[in-house]
């Protein structure tokens, strides 16, 4: 049986972001999202890493994806509004 547990890669992604390894964090969150694409919080976490990497378009897309899953997700709404201003939208 294949374990589709996402808590370990998610925890590793969080730890990588805290330690400053943003590329590793993004890569791990990509894997988490592949395993659990319907969890809006995963997109919010990857958005944070993309913001740190100054990949603002990617971050905006992550928040848009989160809102596609849960349209009233307050953290994504606030983050997307802030990024929209930075991107001139």
Image (tube, rainbow, N blue to C red):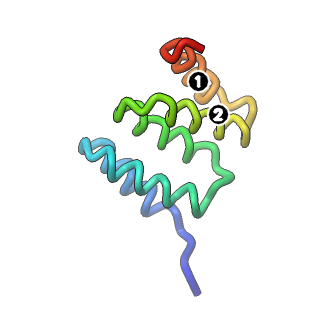
Crowding around mark 1 (Cα neighbors within 10 Å: few <14, some 14 to 19, many 20+) is many
In x, y percent, where is residue 9?
43, 61
Figure quadrant of residue 62: top right
Q: Which residue is mark 1?
A: 80
SS class of the residue under badge 2? helix
Residue at 58 percent across and 63 percent down: it is 35
Q: For residue 68, what is the image quadrant? A: top right
| Marks 2 and 1 in Cβ contact (< 8 Å) | yes
Instruction: Name the residue at 40% across, 39% down.
Output: 49
Q: Disc 2 designates what residue?
A: 64
Q: x, y percentage for residue 47?
A: 49, 37
Q: Which mark is residue 68?
A: none
Quadrant for the N terminus in the image = bottom right
Q: Is residue 56 above or below residue 7?
A: above
Q: Given the current orientation, which residue lies at the most extreme bottom position? A: 1
The residue at the point 67 percent across, 31 percent down is 73
Residue 21's place in the image compared with 70, above or below, is below
Horizontal side of 81 relative to 13 (left or right) equals right
Q: Quadrant of the C terminus?
A: top right
Q: Position of residue 81 (x, y in %)?
A: 59, 17
Res 2 → quadrant: bottom right
Outermost left residue: 19
Residue 32 % position (x, y): 52, 58
Q: Is residue 52 left or right of residue 79?
A: left
Q: Residues within 10 Å of mark 2 (few under 14, many from 20)?
A: many
Element at label 1: helix
| Mark sitting earlier along the chain (2/1) | 2
């Amino acid at each position: 049986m294949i374990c589709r547990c996402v808590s370990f890669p998610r925890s590793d992604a969080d730890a990588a972001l805290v330690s400053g390894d943003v590329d590793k964090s993004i890569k791990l969150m990509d894997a988490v999202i592949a395993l659990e694409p319907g969890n809006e919080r995963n997109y919010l976490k990857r958005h944070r890493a993309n913001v740190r990497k100054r990949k603002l378009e990617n971050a905006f897309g992550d928040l848009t994806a989160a809102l596609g899953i849960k349209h009233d997700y307050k953290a994504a709404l606030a983050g997307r509004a802030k990024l929209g201003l930075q991107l001139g939208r």
